[in-house]
């Protein structure tokens, strides 16, 4: 019963990840892509717990899930801060050009 | 029925409909419904900020519900290891409860400082200004 529940849950998670992949693929802005990557990352942590339930080794897979959630959080924060910083640098250069001319 | 009957049923490997398992399956299915909402919103919404609204809320709540559900499902007996596992999964839930709104906040602030314009009332349905920037 629990095995069937875990299999159905994992399959449904994978199927519902397809729209998020679509948003990563055609996302008009780069922020949409980071948003999709973040959603996929948190759902992969859930998927790791599902896999652990299937193999009866949840005590091991939960540690992987913790590490993956931490890594996904740090990735999203760093990429968005990086984009923000490059944008502000570009703005500063245009302001300097305007001030120079 | 006493608790010992459930334990015998769960240990014998038959169809075990332990109440905690039922509760866990209910939570997992509810999380799947919320994730369906997040995925549909992520596809259908016209603007970055509305997509972020759908993805942030639906993703956070569905992840928390699913992890809680699996924590309840894997709780077969009430031994020490089982409790430790449940506490670990609830630790992941607490982390996601803090981290996912933080990511939403940082992303929205980055997009807002990049002059990513939200849709306004003047934007008709035909002219979608996806990714258009104020200049």
Image: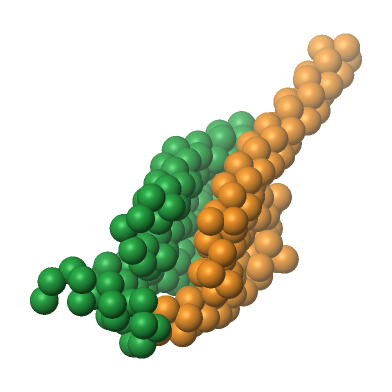
Chain colours: A orange, B green
Q: Give the farthest residue toward the bottom.
A: B14
Residue shown at 13% from the left, 71% from the top: B2
Residue shown at 50% from the left, 51% from the top: B52
The reply to whether residue B118 is in sight is: yes
Q: In this view, does B131 lie above or below B62?
A: above
A39 horizontally vs B132: left or right: left
The quadrant the C terminus of chain A occupies is: top right
Where is residue A54? Give x, y as percent. Answer: 54, 74
The reply to whether residue B53 is in sight is: no
Q: Give the farthest residue toward the top.
A: A100
Q: Which quadrant of the structure image shows residue A100?
A: top right
Out of B113 and A49, give the one closest to the viewer. A49
Where is residue B96? Give x, y as percent. Answer: 47, 45
Residue shown at 86% from the left, 19% from the top: A97
Residue shown at 59% from the left, 58% from the top: A61
The quadrant the N terminus of chain A occupies is: bottom left
Where is residue A65? Give x, y as percent. Answer: 58, 53
Where is residue A14? Give x, y as percent. Answer: 59, 75
Q: In this view, does B46 lie above or below B33?
A: above
Out of A66 and A39, give the one closest to the viewer. A66
B130 horizontally vs A82: left or right: left
Out of A79 and A6, give the one closest to the viewer. A6
């Amino acid at each position: 019963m629990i095995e069937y529940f875990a299999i159905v849950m994992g399959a449904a998670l994978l199927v519902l990840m397809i729209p998020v992949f679509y948003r990563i693929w055609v996302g008009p802005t780069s922020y949409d892509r980071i948003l999709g990557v973040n959603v996929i990352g948190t759902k992969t942590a859930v998927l790791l717990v599902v896999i652990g339930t299937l193999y009866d080794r949840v005590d091991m897979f939960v540690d992987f899930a913790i590490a993956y959630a931490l890594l996904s959080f740090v990735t999203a924060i760093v990429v968005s801060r990086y984009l923000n910083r490059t944008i502000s640098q570009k703005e500063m250069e245009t302001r300097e050009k305007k001030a120079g001319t | 029925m006493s608790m010992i009957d459930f334990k015998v049923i769960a240990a014998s490997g038959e169809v075990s409909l332990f109440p905690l398992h039922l509760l866990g399956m209910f939570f997992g299915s509810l999380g799947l419904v919320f994730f369906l909402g997040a995925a549909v919103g992520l596809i259908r919404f016209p603007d970055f900020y509305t997509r972020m609204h759908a993805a942030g809320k639906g993703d956070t709540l569905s992840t928390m519900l699913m992890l809680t559900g699996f924590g309840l499902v894997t709780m077969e007996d009430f031994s020490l290891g089982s409790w430790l596992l449940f506490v670990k999964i609830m630790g992941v839930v607490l982390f996601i409860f803090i981290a996912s709104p933080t990511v939403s906040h940082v992303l929205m602030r980055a997009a807002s400082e990049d002059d990513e314009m939200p849709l306004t009332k003047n934007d008709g349905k035909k002219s979608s200004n996806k990714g258009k920037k104020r200049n």
